[in-house]
Amino acid sequence: MAVFRWRQNWEPFRDLEQQVNRLLESIRVPLPSIRLDRHFPPVNLFECENEFLLTAELPGLQPEHLEVTMNGGVLTLRGERRGPDGVPDERFRRHERMWGSWQRSLSIPHRVQEDKVSAELTDGVLKIRLPKVEETKSRQIPINGGPQ
């Protein structure tokens, strides 16, 4: 397939990204860092009436290996997943679970009460509750007539 398409919108970076993705998908090596499209951990973000609820799958992680921060509408998850002890890389026949240090930042689509954000880790699922900021209601402002 041609990288450049004439008489169409030319988006070279999108085309380059697609070509690199195809190349990386064809490589079968046990290096998790070579797959650039993986985002760890997988998350779901739900909007409830008074809060957002973010869930992240983190099997095998302990709370002491996690850090959750919130700043300026961006939620950042950091952690470290430890690899299997005593298994050298050349012994792997399939390597799909990532290990090592990771970080993931997500923009929250609404203002939240950052000082009231809470997190809990149960059975490998991290739940982060992000209470919404109450909407301020608009009010009618009277207009006074100036001096006549």
Image (cartoon, rainbow, N blue to C red):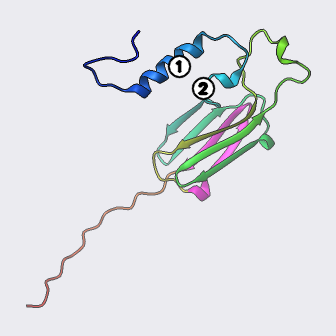
Q: Residue 20, which numbered label?
A: 1
Q: Residues within 10 Å of mark 1 (few under 14, many from 20)?
A: few
Residue located beneath label 2 in the image: 36
- In reply to whether residue 115 is colored magenta, the answer given is yes
Q: Please name the residue shown 58% across and 39% down the image.
A: 54
Q: Residue 136, which numbered label?
A: none
Q: In the rendered structure, which segment of residues is drawn in magenta?
A: 114-130
Please indicate whether residue 136 sits to the left or right of residue 123 in the image: left
Residue furthest right in the image = 86
- List x then y, in percent, for residue 56: 63, 34
Report which quarter residue 79 is drawn in.
Answer: top right
Say if mark 1 contacts mark 2, CB within 8 Å.
yes
- List x then y, in percent, for residue 136: 39, 61
Q: Label 2, secondary structure: give it.
A: loop
Q: Please name the residue shown 71% across and 46% down the image.
A: 67
The answer to which of marks 1 and 2 sits earlier in the sequence is 1
Q: Residues within 10 Å of mark 2 (few under 14, many from 20)?
A: few
What is the three-letter code of the residue carrying label 1?
A: Val
